Amino acid sequence: MSERKSIHGEWSSGMAFFLAATGSAIGLGNIWRFPYLAGENGGGAFILVYLACIVLIALPILIAEITLGRRGRESPLNTFRRLALDEGRSRAWAGVGFIGMLSGIIILSFYSVVAGWSLEYIWLSLRGAYQGASADRTDQLFSMLTSSPWQQMFWYTLFLALTLIIVARGVRKGLERAVWIMVPLLFVLLAVLVAYALVVGDAHAAIVYLYSVDFSRLSGHAVLLAMGHSFFTLSLGIGAMIVYGAYMPNRLSIMRAAISVAVADTVVAVLAGLAIFPLLFARHLPVAQGPKLIFASLPAAFGSLPFGFLFGAAFFALLTLAAWTSAISIIEPVVSWLVELGWSRPRSVLAVGSVVWMSSMLIDFSLNVWSGITWQGRTLFDLFNFVSSDIMLPLGGLLIALFAGWVISERSLRQELRMNRGALRLWLWVLRYVTPVGVLLIFLNALGLIRGAL
Ligand code: PFF
């Protein structure tokens, strides 16, 4: 076990780590992206493949990230450098931490725009803005929001400010305190919303749509989507779990913690579908793709259901909370690195926040004033989403798997993981061979190199 101490502080308990890491994992990916992907790509069959990907690809990397973090006890960039030097390898491995920080900034710039919409929808729900509105009308309402640069700016600026305030207060007083309140609240809201959807919605249709196992709807491409999503949903590839591991007390079992996080994240993803689809099917609403599923179709359902304004507000509060606890984990790797360079935490937060705010502005404008500017048919919003989720995260994950599997000695890993030799060997074997091949497939798919073949 490493005797190093983090200069940033430590989680006070195993529960604190669990809440922070689960808060990071549960985000827009679970509540909006997963249900939609599952519904479109074979329901239960997709979910089975996704579970296999979680176990074979994502979980081994999650364990690796937490292990590296706890051994290095520094920001991801400095952890890579330090651990590589410990093993007598090149300090250039620090570049993996750098790629991660860059991906984090890119992800957060569109994540905060979407979270900003979610914040605004809490307000719209409470005001009854979409009560009794048709699907066309709620679609229009959403288009109006995205076509107004200043209105959008107000909401993502607010979301970023809320995120930055927490990170500026540090690990114990900021992150830990926030997740103690927000993550349990998130679970309560989800339970209430699932119960509501099952009572007032068409649960049968939703269950058939989501969970019937239909392998004929499962294409090769869907398998790769499931793999990519398993990655995004566990917050892998940018160093978020490395930095959270750096704050984990030595006495905790990494394996147990990682499995709990993966299970909680998966349960939430599966439940989120049950909070959404029964409502849409009850009103025979279109299962829209992309952001519209939540921001155009779903409000039309809430708008015509009993107490819809209240449950609508609760749904968007849930989405905002989920995005918020993820956002803090996206910037912590960069902030911790600046603090290690000697900057104060508030100053580091302000610097990172300004950069993210400016790139959010690019995303904002790409949806309205610059919507005509596209590259190969993609707006900047699509491009940022694609480059970060489909290219940079898998690349970061691949390098992390190679680093933990091939650069760090088995002895160091055993000291940190403290598990029996057989289990360690199995994990290492998966990490060395299965995970890199899987990630490589996602990566080639994202670049369009194997899409035609599948
Ligand atoms: N896991 C988050 C989600 O499912 O929405 C997204 C995410 C958070 C990705 C943190 C990467 C990250 F570091």
Image: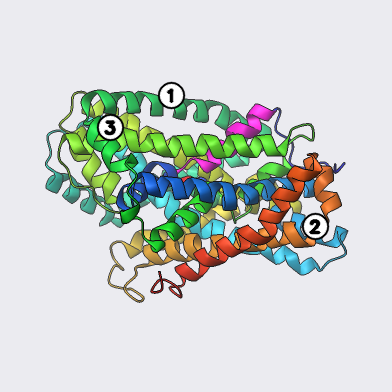
What x and y, as percent, mark residue 71? 79, 47
Judge by depth and name the residue closer to the eye, 414 or 28: 414
Q: Secondary structure at mark 3?
A: helix
User: Label 2 vs label 3: CA separation?
Assistant: 48 Å
Judge by depth and name the residue closer to the eye, 251 or 149: 251
Judge by depth and name the residue closer to the eye, 434 or 188: 434
Question: Is most of the magenta stretch helix, strand or loop?
Answer: helix
What x and y, as percent, mark residue 381? 38, 62
Q: Which residues are magenta?
A: 14-27
Which residue is found at the position 37% from the left and 52% from the top? 153
State left or right for residue 65 relative to residue 148.
right
- Tell me: residue 208, above or below residue 29: above
Q: Which residue is mark 2?
A: 408
Which residue is found at the position 20% from the left and 31% from the top? 128
Quarter of the C terminus within the rendering? bottom left
Q: Marks 2 and 3: CB-CB under 8 Å? A: no
Select label 1 or label 3 by which is in front. 1
- Say few, some or many: other residues with alpha carbon within 10 Å of mark 1 (under 14 / 14 to 19 / 20 or more): few
Label 1 within 8 A of ligand 1 by Cβ: no
Quarter of the N terminus within the rendering? top right
Q: Which residue is mark 1?
A: 188
Q: Amino acid at mark 3?
A: Gly
Q: Which residue is mark 3?
A: 312
Which residue is found at the position 38% from the left and 74% from the top? 452
User: Label 1 vs label 2: CA separation?
Assistant: 41 Å
- Tell me: residue 331, above or below residue 173: below
Judge by depth and name the residue closer to the eye, 307 or 351: 307
Q: Secondary structure at mark 2?
A: loop
